[in-house]
């Protein structure tokens, strides 16, 4: 039932969000990971839920509370995240904020031991690209938003990713500073129509701005 004063603009819409890093095991006690805290993705999930959407949040290993009203699915690896995303479809929109590990190792069954013969070789293989896969899928969400973590030439790389991945928008951030793990973010909002340079904002404020854009886009169609 609709409650007075409550934002219900996304009522009846399903939005899928990924957040956090993935962990790729090397052996039973070690993994490859990255510095993603999950804060930006959790903020996006919360902002969409506050607008009345049904939100499925596929989260890598993070130390964060689930935002109110969000359905959370915890995963560890990129392949688990890809499977959980596929299982959560269909969705009206998807926002892939997760910093998915690009490579995985073939994990050893037992803890790898030092044997005085030098470090073990790590044979890496490439993980599936969840965003690009979703863009090509029969169940492609009507609005598909990617994030891009860059340490240089942010706009050039973001435009290239928008084209290569087949998504509608890219939210690009420069992660060479204190973005990963921090509470603030400065992003470029990149679409086919051009680039907006958003000011440095709290991650909650970035999430609110993005959720407003998503709301406008979903109500338009
Ligand atoms: N992404 C994904 N699956 C992957 C890698 C990335 O879904 N295996 C998504 C991220 O969630 C993000 C977008 O793709 O929304 C861009 O991620 P990014 O790591 O910046 O792009 P890559 O294509 O992996 O390029 P790079 O070599 O810069 O890491
Ligand atoms: Ca990557």
Image (cartoon, rainbow, N blue to C red):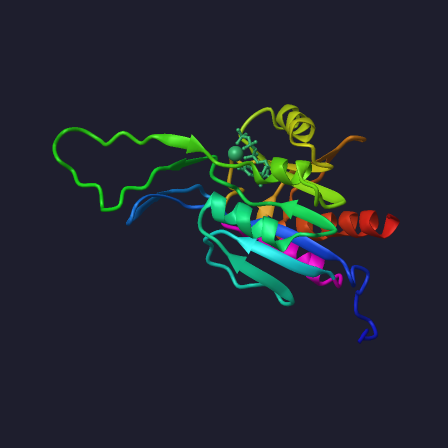
The residues colored magenta run 36-52
Left or right placement of residue 79 versus residue 85 in this view: left
Residue 193 versus residue 52 in the image, above or below: above
Q: Residue furthest front?
A: 138
At which x and y percent is residue 106? 34, 38
What residue is rendered at 45% in x and 53% in y?
A: 61
Relative to the observer, which residue lies in front, 106 or 220?
106
Ligand 1 image-quadrant field: top right
What residue is rendered at 71% in x and 63% in y?
A: 50
Residue 24 falls in which quadrant of the image? Answer: top left
Residue 125 falls in which quadrant of the image? Answer: top left
What residue is rendered at 70% in x and 36% in y?
A: 167
Relative to the observer, which residue lies in front, 95 or 136?
136
At which x and y percent is residue 33? 41, 42
**Residue 5 visible:** yes
Relative to the observer, which residue lies in front, 48 or 195?
48
Q: Which residue lies furthest to the right in this view?
A: 220
Relative to the observer, which residue lies in front, 146 or 186?
146
Residue 108 versus residue 16 in the image, above or below: above
Left or right placement of residue 211 versus residue 134 in this view: right
At which x and y percent is residue 55? 66, 59
Left or right placement of residue 69 versus residue 111 in this view: right
Quadrant in which the N terminus is drawn: bottom right
What residue is rendered at 16% in x and 38% in y?
A: 114
């Amino acid at each position: 039932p609709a409650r007075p004063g409550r934002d219900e603009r996304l009522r009846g819409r399903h939005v899928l969000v990924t957040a956090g890093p993935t962990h790729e095991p090397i052996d039973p006690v070690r993994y490859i990971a990255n510095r993603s805290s999950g804060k930006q993705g959790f903020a996006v999930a919360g902002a969409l839920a506050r607008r009345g959407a049904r939100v499925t949040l596929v989260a890598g290993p993070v130390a964060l509370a689930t935002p109110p009203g969000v359905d959370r699915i915890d995963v560890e690896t990129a392949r688990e995240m890809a499977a959980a995303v596929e299982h959560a479809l269909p969705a009206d929109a998807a926002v892939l904020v997760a910093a998915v590990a690009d490579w995985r190792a073939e994990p050893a069954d037992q803890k790898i031991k030092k044997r005085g013969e030098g470090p073990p070789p790590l044979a890496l293989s490439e993980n599936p690209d969840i965003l690009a896969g979703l863009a090509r899928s029969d169940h492609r969400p009507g609005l598909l938003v990617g994030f891009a973590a860059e340490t240089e030439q942010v706009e050039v790389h973001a435009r290239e990713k928008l084209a290569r991945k087949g998504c509608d928008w890219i939210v690009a951030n420069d992660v060479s500073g204190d973005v990963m793990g921090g509470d603030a973010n400065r992003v470029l909002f990149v679409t086919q129509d051009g680039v907006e340079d958003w000011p440095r904002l709290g991650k909650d404020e970035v999430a609110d701005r993005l959720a407003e854009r998503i709301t406008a886009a979903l109500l338009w169609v």
